Amino acid sequence: MSTLAASWLPLTPGERAVALEVLTHGPLSRTEIARRLELSPGSLTRLTKPLLESGLLIESHLPVEEFATAAVGRQGRPSQPLDIIAESRHFAGFKITADTVYGVVTTLRSEVVAQHSRPLTTHDPHEVADLLHDMADAFGHDFPQLAGIGIGVGGRVQERAVVAESAFLGWSDVRIAELVEERSGLPVVVENDVAALIEAEAWFGAGRGLERFAVLTIGAGIGYGLVLDGKLIRSSDDGRGVGKRWIINPNGPLTPDGERGSAIALLTIPNICYQVQAATGREVDYDEVLALAAAGDPVASRVIDEAARGLGTLVAQIANFALPQKILLAGEGVGLVDVAGPAVEEAISANRHPLADPIVMETKVSDFHQWARGAAVLAIQVLVLGAKEV
């Protein structure tokens, strides 16, 4: 582990709670931190002292008037708010696909400050580790404060270190974190790519501050996750491709990559394109399908309308059973909402009680560099929380 990363560890549970609150919601006055964490002023002073001494927290020099609300009703000079210097550490994040590695560098608050991609010409674990090291090393020339590496992989990951199974890479029990750590000398954390994206949204994005938050991703596959009290719910189903068995319409399309009428069959980009190609006899990409549907092409419109209704049904099912405060739709495939939004809404209404609360839904088209950003957040978590299992 690098000296920079090690200088912040270990933190006590109380110190971690304070650091995390400031990282994800700061700058915050001491009064506000104490209120959020239900701490006495003395306890907060005790917890913040080592964080200030280590440089993890700083007293912000922003104008005091910006924090006047926190000072209302108090006597004397208001204390300076506590914050984190986002640029004090940088993190590399990588998303591995079948043919490309997408990489980013983020600040401590997950702002992307650089990005790059390289073709992946082999799936040999040692050669993939060499490529990841080369990309991280290139990033390190411009960002010498690089403190950790996160890697997102489609498939099942154990202990945030071992790719237990990844069909598209042909990997089984590959200790990729260890291979990259040996080459880079930096702490490395590995996670299922959907889980990484969800962690990023829970800490720094659409789910920040929410107690119950669900994410549904649509792209080459289907991903789903539920966050409760800021933590992603984990199970043995993680990374096993539940979309293939998530049946939305038993009379729906049958495709090579999913059970009849499954979420995979209805909603994934390859299968949407397959359905249009099967009907027209010509190859089409996803953007072309969406454009054709928007222009009223009958084949593309039928396929996209069916996908949109399937999406609305899926969203309603999630809302009915998980009761989230918000559902985020993410991934490369959510452009269908722009083209067929009314069909999505109609299906949601048809599958919800008429007096149920409206679903708070947000859409975010996530390219592969955004997935890589999610992986970088894993490294941020390890640095701040001090463990790969969070």
Image: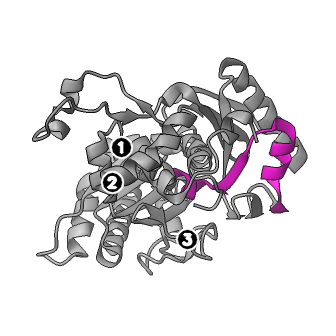
Q: Dot 1: few (<14), some (14–19), or many (≥20) neighbours within 10 Å?
A: some
Q: Residue at x 78, y 51 (%)?
A: 177
Image vertical order of residue 239 relative to residue 292, above or below:
below
Alpha carbons under labels 2 and 1: distance apart? 8 Å
Answer left or right for 3 relative to 274. Answer: right
Residue 56 colored in magenta in the image:
no
Image vertical order of residue 203 relative to residue 91, above or below:
below
Residue type highlighted by circle 3: Arg
Q: Which mark is residue 25?
A: 1
Alpha carbons under labels 2 and 3: distance apart? 19 Å
- Contact? badges 3 and 1 (CB < 8 Å): no
Residue 175 colored in magenta in the image:
yes
The residue that label 3 is drawn on is 234
- Camera sees residue 336: no
Q: Secondary structure at mark 3?
A: loop
Image vertical order of residue 83 relative to residue 301, above or below:
above
The residue that label 2 is drawn on is 209
Foreground mark, 2 or 1, reads 1
Over which residues does the magenta segment extend? 172-197
Answer left or right for 384 relative to 356. Answer: right
Residue type highlighted by circle 1: His
Earlier-in-chain disc, 3 versus 1: 1
Earlier-in-chain disc, 2 versus 1: 1
Residue type highlighted by circle 2: Gly
Q: Secondary structure at mark 2?
A: loop
Q: Nearer the viewer, residue 287 or 322?
A: 322
Q: Nearer the viewer, residue 353 or 265?
A: 353
